[in-house]
Image (tube, helix red, strand yellow):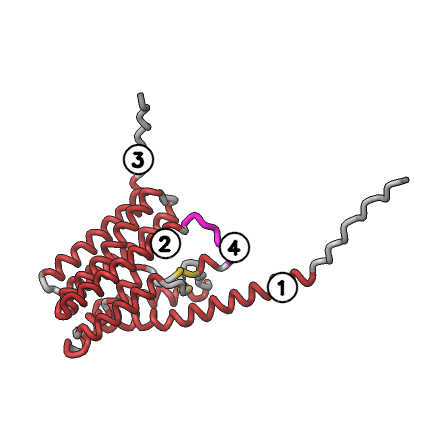
Amino acid sequence: MMMRRPRRRLRDQSINRLIPNMCTVLALCAGLTAIRFAVDQRWDAAVIAMVAAGIFDGLDGRIARLLGGSTKFGAELDSLSDVISFGVAPAVTLYLWSLKGASTLGWTVALIFAVCCALRLARFNSRLEEVDPMPWAGQFFTGVPAPAGAGLAILPIMLSFELGDAVFRHPAVVAPVMLAVAGLMVSRLPINSFKKVKVPHHLIVPMLLGVGILAGLLISATWITLILIGVAYIVNIPLSIRTHARLKRSHEEQLAAQAAAAPPASPPLAPPESKP
């Protein structure tokens, strides 16, 4: 008779340790709500919902690390939320907004984007427990992360809000943008994660002031501000590649210098001669 394996149950958790999972669920709800707004052709509300999903997604990981609430359950929930909020929601929104006019080809582009987002997240999860020998590895993502990819993909919608639909809504513009972003997500390009950036003490107050100014701009000039953030992120990509190459070259030079300074290995001792 086969023995039944004991069922694993979730352990009791304090409310504080559940806050990251709550943020993840809110991100998932925002992504699903974006799809609903897209179906209703409320494009501005759909974009705002995806931006809100990105904010909640950015909060959950950082809060989890601060509270020590990182769990396997939370990691799996976060991945499922990201696929829907930053893979499915942008693909459906852009298909209904523009790619629907390209028929089967438009739907194929939407599928490629969603699949690339899922593949990027699967690769990220599979490497969570790997230890990268490079000391600066934690400063970079491999490929554009899913939330940033979703933000870059919906740039044509935000541009159309400011400059009109005549150009940016055409499938000939939207499809190449989506394919380019999909390629960036599954690429192996090093992208600065800004996780380990330290703010000097004399810049803390100006930085907080800058956050307040950014909040004001998001309220008063929402689309222009979001577009500029997207452009700044695009500029960051080649800068990240350059910084990664410089760090790698410096590390290799350091290893070469250590190898040159190391004393030469002594030759092995000859075995004693055997007596006749």
Q: Disc 2 and disc 1: Cα gap in Å? A: 32 Å
Numbered tag placed on residue 133 in the rendering: 4
Q: At 73% across and 55% down in the image, what residue appears?
A: 265
Q: Earlier in the sequence, mark 3 or mark 1?
A: 3
Amino acid type at mark 4: Pro
Q: Which callout, 3 or 1, points to the residue nearer the camera?
A: 1
Q: Which residue is mark 1?
A: 256
Q: Secondary structure at mark 2?
A: helix
Q: Disc 3 and disc 1: Cα gap in Å? A: 49 Å
In this picture, residue 113 sits left or right of residue 267: left
Q: Earlier in the sequence, mark 3 or mark 4?
A: 3
Location of residue 102 with respect to 51 vertically, above or below: below
Tell me the magenta residue range. Answer: 128-135
In this picture, residue 245 sits left or right of residue 71: right
Q: Quadrant of the C terminus?
A: top right
Q: Secondary structure at mark 3?
A: loop
Q: Which residue is mark 3?
A: 10
Q: Earlier in the sequence, mark 4 or mark 2?
A: 2
Q: Give residue 8's position: percent from left, percent from top.
A: 32, 32
Q: Earlier in the sequence, mark 3 or mark 2?
A: 3
Report if residue 18 is visible in the image. Answer: yes
The reply to whether callout 3 and callout 1 are in contact (CB within 8 Å) is: no
Q: Secondary structure at mark 1?
A: helix
Q: Which residue is mark 2?
A: 123
Q: Disc 1 and disc 4: Cα gap in Å? A: 16 Å
Q: Disc 4 and disc 2: Cα gap in Å? A: 18 Å
